[in-house]
Amino acid sequence: MNNEKYIKSIHRLGRLGSLGALGFMVGIPLVICTIYSCFPDFGLVIQSGTGLLAMFIPIAISEVFSYAPVLGSASYITFITGNVMNLKLPVAINAIDIAGVEQSTDEGDAVVTVAVGASSIVTMAIIAVGVLLLVPLQPIFAIPAVKTATGYMLPALFGGLALGIFNGRSGKYNIKGKLLGAVPAVIIVIIMMIMGVPLSTYQGFVIVGMIPVTILASWLMYKKGIIKVYEQGKTEPEPVASKK
């Protein structure tokens, strides 16, 4: 009962927070345009944004389907604060790995929610400090060594994410060959590139299409025994699928 109460409350707060964030994003430009009487032509706005919407709406949909199983209840605060791929997702994956819990469980959901929440607070604090000290620290940012170091920040973040992906552990289970499920999707993308399909234009649709391909391939390989799931702590573990 407490678990059901928590789920209902987190969804209610998440929806209210999402609506509030959307209100701020739309409301601030609306207020500024009202004060200065500088409303753009609505038709021109739609015409200019059609191309971007066609690309980013599928990307947004694919992110919800692909990230939500990992983020759980933290999806709300993650999509509100942003920096999903380069910050929140690595935080969630590493938190699950360090805590030794499983994705899509109550324990995993709690760990990820705390980790992403702490990450969001730290990010906002750092941004606030950075804004206040931007001018005084400008000479330091211009030092060649600092410029070189900042160029490695994003690769370091993706490196942390890659370690979580290549790690074969998932909670109390070991997964052997889990990356093989992505091979068919990679092959399809390579074929599309060879055929000259502009992936930069249709990347959102490609991501949405490759999600079911990867899931289906992983399921088939699991059934065929190519991808194996074992319980940890056993020298000669028995496959989980064979247990009744």
Image (cartoon, helix red, strand yellow):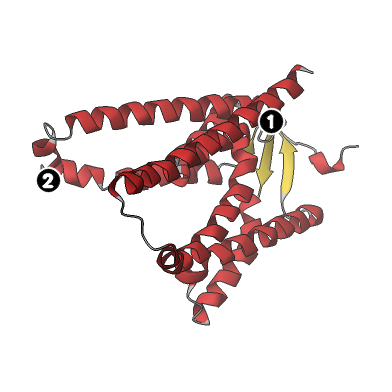
Q: Tell whether label 2 touches label 1 (CB within 8 Å).
A: no
Mark 1 → mark 2, Cα distance in angstroms: 46 Å
Q: Identity of the amino acid at label 1?
A: Lys
- What residue is shown at x 66% (from left), y 24% (from top)? 9
Quadrant of the drawing holding the C terminus:
top right
Number of on-image labels: 2
Label 2 residue SS: helix
Quick one: which residue is furthest to the bottom in this view?
Answer: 195
Q: Is residue 218 above or below residue 87?
A: below
Quadrant of the drawing holding the N terminus:
top right
- Could you say where residue 203 lies in the image, as x and y percent from the top left? 51, 65
Query: Relative to the observer, which residue lies in front, 197 or 57?
Result: 57
Left/right of residue 5 with respect to residue 79 in the rendered view: right
Left/right of residue 197 with respect to residue 155 in the rendered view: right
- Could you say where residue 20 lies in the image, as x and y percent from the top left? 51, 35
Q: Which residue is mark 2?
A: 144
- What residue is shown at x 54% (from left), y 58% (from top)? 57
Quick one: which residue is furthest to the right in this view?
Answer: 244
Q: Identity of the amino acid at label 2?
A: Pro
User: Can residue 90 be spotted in the picture?
Assistant: no
Q: Quadrant of residue 108?
A: top right
Query: Relative to the observer, which residue lies in front, 125 or 154?
Result: 125
Q: Which residue is mark 1?
A: 172
**Which of the numbered marks, if any, corresponds to residue 106?**
none
- What residue is shown at x 62% (from left), y 24% (from top)? 110
Q: Nearer the viewer, mark 1 or mark 2?
A: 2
- Could you say where residue 181 lies in the image, as x and y percent from the top left? 66, 57
Label 1 residue SS: loop
The numbered mark, 1 or 2, whose residue comes first in the sequence reads: 2
Determine crowd level at label 2: few under 14, some 14-19, many 20+ residues with C-alpha closer than 10 A: few
